[in-house]
Amino acid sequence: MTKGSTCILVTGASGFLGSNITRALLGAGHSVRALRRIDSSMARVADIMDDVEWLTIGESREDEFAAFFEGVDCVIHTAASYGRKGESVVDIAKANTILGLDVLNAALERKVKTFINTDSALPKNTKPYTLSKAHFAEWGRYFAENSQIRFINIRLEHMYGPGDDSVKFTNYVIDACLSNVPILNLTEGKQERDFIYIDDVVSAYMLLLKRLTSMDLSYCDISLGSGKTVSIRALVETIHRIANSKTRLAFGATKLSANDVMHSCADISYMKSLGWQPEMPLHQGLLTTVEYARQGQ
């Protein structure tokens, strides 16, 4: 795909990942359309609202929704419900499976060539979020294997960076440490996770767009992370030091959930074969994210 020649539709464009991808697409000269929920906060994209063509889910008729996909070359699907704000299992399934199917169906109807989906790297039985995302990816595989669309399923590790939601683990810990809450209850922190900085995630999506014409695949799972792990305890202690926090870290005060995963790390060999590699070291990424949060206090 050449610069300026494509129309990309982004779901979740007002969210953390979606807004960063949308900015990168505009910067590369692409035409961008975006879906938003009626109750979505548009704070992250306030300055680029006029550069994007928007459609509000729930306010459009079925034929208007489908027509919005006319002429779209690729859908980048980032919309998701993580279940961290008290959503019911039904609400999570509607957001992650049913909405995804609505978007995929419209893309199929208007013969969109490629669908790039954002999935979780964690096993599907970890929580309702991962299960509902896995269900949607299975639908994507079904349609791709019937030669109706190219479906790229990005299995994303733990993404972090400035401006992410405070309910996400990394930013939750940062906010607690900067606020010097008296005590932060945690598990023992032995779980090992792969943390990837937002700019590295966005650069991977942008590279995939450039490589689409050379990818002779109907469906593929792509692991995306830094390719390295750190224990949760080490991550929290690093944030605590950077923030110069007085918060007491109570490791072991919280029990692991029954389905908690002890090790998760991306195999990034495929992305490296395309010419991508992560650039942001974890410590520097945390410094940047903590400083951003500090300025926002």
Image (cartoon, grey):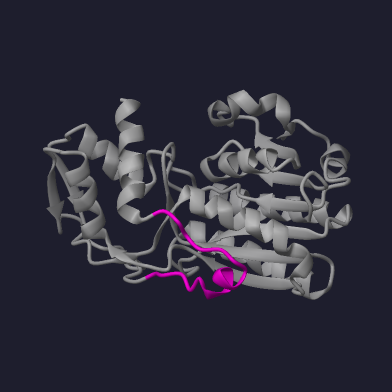
Q: Residue at x 12, y 37 (%)?
A: 182
Q: Is residue 49 above or below residue 157?
A: above
Residue 54 placement (x, y as % from top left): 74, 32
Position of 76 with respect to 149 (left or right) is: left
Q: Is residue 185 above or below residue 180?
A: below
Q: Main secondary structure of the magenta part?
A: loop
* Residue 45 is one of the magenta-drawn residues: no
Residue 57 placement (x, y as % from top left): 71, 36
Position of 196 with respect to 48 (left or right) is: left
Point out the image quarter for the C terminus: top left
In the image, 184 versus 283, the foreground residue is: 283
User: Is residue 12 something that shows in the picture?
Assistant: no
The answer to which quarter of the image holds residue 226 is: bottom left
In the image, 217 versus 34, the foreground residue is: 217
User: Is residue 33 something that shows in the picture?
Assistant: yes
* Residue 267 is one of the magenta-drawn residues: yes
Q: Which residues are magenta?
A: 264-280
The answer to which quarter of the image holds residue 162 is: top left
